[in-house]
Amino acid sequence: MMELEKGIEPNFADYDKRTALHLASSEGCTEVVELLLREGADVNSTDRWGRTPLSDARSFGHVDICEILEARGGIDPVGVDSQSPCYEIDPIEVDMESSILIGEGGYGEVYLVKWRGTAVAAKTIRSSIASNPKVRNTFIRELALWQKLRHPNIVQFLGVLKQSDRLIFLTEYLRNGSLYDILRKKGRLDPRIAVSYALDIARGMNYLHRHKPPIIHRDLTPSNVLQDEAGHLKVTDFGLSKIGEERDERGYKMTGGTGSYRYMAPEVYRRETYGKSVDVFSFAIIVHEMFQGGPSNRAEAPEQLADRRAYEDSRPPLSSYFYPDPIKMLLRECWHKNQECRPTFEEIIQKLESIQVELQNGKTMRAAGCSCAIL
């Protein structure tokens, strides 16, 4: 509703020509579907695969939404048994010759290219990885999963270049850069902005964790959180940590680079069994840095930092007046040494929304031992 009040058109579509009604229908959000239809959303808008909101509602078994859409004249031109959208893109459609290198990671390079005249990001997987048949097949299976993901707070996967010996896949291009860039430029963020950003990340991660099967990021860092033109954050590169073959002496996959150690959960460093809570730990470190203005221990090597967190239960300091008490409590819960005690992202969202309301209402949120008020 807030986006509509800002003047966003109800029929606004993304790269795949998918609208908010497509997303709400596939996610089973009945109230949102009804709201969008009241606001004039096209019940039969089609995405680039010819699917309508009713097609999506039927595919995911949302009977109540199917009835609502059908009552408004909704049709399903592809049928409930249609195959999943093809994610292969003809290389002819992509102008790789005029590509611009915009980033590098442990898995390969990122280029700015034009696809059908639109600026997109092309991510290459290093030949040392792509040449391994097992790794390549794992990656292709990941892509088949990514093509079904749709959420405002995750970077949109667009497709993979077919018959590519380099393994190149395309995602939407977010020209505002990463959260890492924002923190490096601005330093400590206003509490209201920090909480808003934290909610964006938590919502994207909650979507991934609640997916069937669940998707664990494993490499959630400020560099893997990008900002769109509206100022919202989107999570990217989820699942890429699975495809790296290089390992350090502890067996940790080095796909994300050594910088990932700074955000690594202790159980990952110790090579123990872990689950979704590793992303919650990484999230807490990111939120800490948004309030702090960056890492509090820049001089310490990331590997040494991860070692102290894993074996000495070391955590970032929270004594500064930068942290409102509710944020301190949330961070302590999120980086709890027992992964079973950490909250889920669904619970984190509820807590952050309460904190956001207090900040918007101008309530004083004092940090312990400080007479300063953060409004």
Image: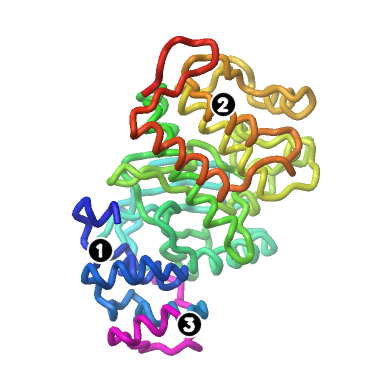
Q: Residues within 10 Å of mark 1 (few under 14, many from 20)?
A: few
Q: Amino acid at mark 2?
A: Lys
Residue at the disc numbered 2: 328
Q: Is residue 359 above or below residue 15?
A: above
Q: Residue at x 36, y 66 (%)?
A: 32
Would residue 350 appear left or right of 95 to someone viewing this image?
Answer: right
The picture places residue 101, in percent across and down from the top left corner, at 38, 43
Residue at the disc numbered 1: 12
Q: CA distance from mark 2 to mark 3?
A: 43 Å
Q: Secondary structure at mark 3?
A: helix
- Observer-nearest of 72 and 316: 72
Q: Residue at x 22, y 67 (%)?
A: 39
Q: Is residue 74 magenta?
A: yes
Q: Amino acid at mark 3?
A: Val
Q: Which label number is shown at residue 187?
A: none
- Observer-nearest of 129 and 160: 160
Q: Main secondary structure of the magenta part?
A: loop
Q: Mark 3 and mark 2 in contact (Cβ < 8 Å)? A: no
Mark 1 vs mark 2: give the one in front: 2
Q: Residues within 10 Å of mark 2 (few under 14, many from 20)?
A: some
Q: Is residue 353 above or below residue 369?
A: below
Q: Residue at x 57, y 31 (%)?
A: 285
Would residue 148 appear left or right of 129 to someone viewing this image?
Answer: left
The picture places residue 312, in percent across and down from the top left corner, at 78, 22
Residue 288 visible? The answer is: yes
Quadrant in which the N terminus is drawn: bottom left
Quadrant in which the C terminus is drawn: top left
Number of disc labels: 3
Q: How is the image coloured?
A: rainbow
Q: Which label number is shown at residue 63?
A: 3
Range covered by the magenta-colored residues: 63-90
- Observer-nearest of 115 and 242: 242
